[in-house]
Amino acid sequence: MAWSTVEEALGLKEMVRNRDLWKALLAEFLGTMLLTLIGCFSTIGWAEGDAKDPYMPSMVQIALAFGITVATLAQDK
């Protein structure tokens, strides 16, 4: 099968004209960004006061943060 133009070969016409595709791409980008930010922030510990005994989150807390984030972002309308 031979393509007549580069746009046809790469499928650029479908990308430009299809609003649902752009909507899906934006949703995927935002979901991945939020998962990364919330998940990575859940691993950061902090120190209060003189930092002799800094607080570090446990593995369960980190896993719950990732799991709740995924469950929240994967909800349907």
Image (cartoon, grey):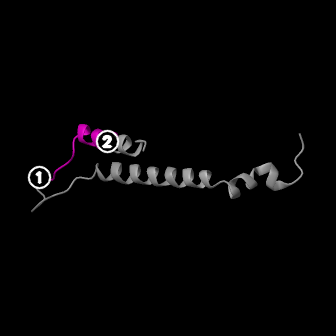
- The residue most toward the bottom is 49
Q: Which mark is residue 68?
A: 2
Judging from the image, what secondary structure is the residue with disc 2 in? helix
Front residue of this view, candidates 34 and 58: 34
Category of crowding for the residue at label 2, using alpha-carbon neighbours closer than 10 angstroms: few (below 14), some (14–19), many (at least 20): some
Q: Is residue 55 magenta?
A: yes
Residue 11, percent from left and from top: 75, 50
Secondary structure beneath dot 1 equals: loop
What residue is shown at x 60% (from left), y 51% (from top)?
20
Identify the image quadrant of residue 70. Answer: top left
The three-letter amino acid code for the residue at tag 2 is Ile
User: At 24% from the left edge and 37% from the top edge, which residue is drawn?
Assistant: 60
Amino acid at the residue labelled 1: Asp
Residue at x-position 61% and y-position 51%: 21
Which residue is labeled 1 in the image? 53
At horizontal 44% and vertical 50% (from top left) the residue drawn is 31
Q: Is residue 1 above or below residue 24?
A: above
In the image, the segment drawn in magenta is 53-67
- 19 up-or-down from 75: above or below: below
Q: Is residue 34 magenta?
A: no
CA separation in Å, label 2 and label 1 = 28 Å
Q: In the figure, residue 69 lies in which quadrant?
A: top left
x, y (%) of residue 76?
43, 42
As drawn, the label of residue 29 is none
